[in-house]
Amino acid sequence: MIEHGVSSDWKTEQGQELMNKTIPRWAMPVAAALILACGCASQRITTVAEVPPPAPEETEAVVASPGPQYAWIQGHWEWRGRWVWIRGRWVVPPHLYAVWVPGHWARRPRGYVWIPSRWN
């Protein structure tokens, strides 16, 4: 196919030649492996506490929403060598029908583990 006096074969050859010069062949598989490894590693991080978390804060003040597209994320306890209350906040959901599933602490043989919050 000729487009403005240049054949598409020439464009393909030039693009492939440019890619071969600028990106080593091994770079794409390595980048893909790193991306996958990062995703897997984040799923394995577990917080373990030997003592149970305190009762949830019953009187958390919910401030006015910054806009109609925001959703309230309730506060929770976090273990940082001691229990620290993480206040609730307003966030924009990732898509229109997203539903927030709050994280929680679950009893396990080694102590209490944090089951992370997530959007469904």
Image: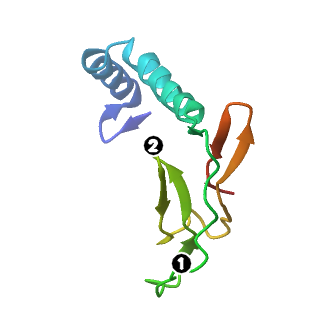
**Dot 1 and dot 2 residues touching (CB under 8 Å):** no
- Judging by the rendered image, the residue that carries numbered circle 2 is 81
Residue 62: x %, y % from top left? 52, 82
Residue drawn at (38%, 12%), measured in percent from left and top? 25
Q: Nearer the viewer, mark 1 or mark 2?
A: 2
Q: In the image, which disc is placed on residue 60?
A: 1
Secondary structure, mark 2, is loop
Q: Total number of numbered labels?
A: 2
Secondary structure, mark 1, is loop
Residue drawn at (30%, 17%), measured in percent from left and top? 17
Residue 4: x %, y % from top left? 31, 42
For the C terminus, the quadrant is bottom right
Residue drawn at (58%, 69%), measured in percent from left and top? 74
Tag 2: residue type?
A: Gly
For the N terminus, the quadrant is top left
Tag 1: residue type?
A: Glu
Residue 73: x %, y % from top left? 56, 69
Q: Residues within 10 Å of mark 2 (few under 14, many from 20)?
A: few
Residue drawn at (64%, 41%), measured in percent from left and top? 113
The image shows residue 87, relative to residue 24, as above or below, that is below
61 with respect to 107 (left or right): left
The image shows residue 73, relative to residue 117, as above or below, that is below
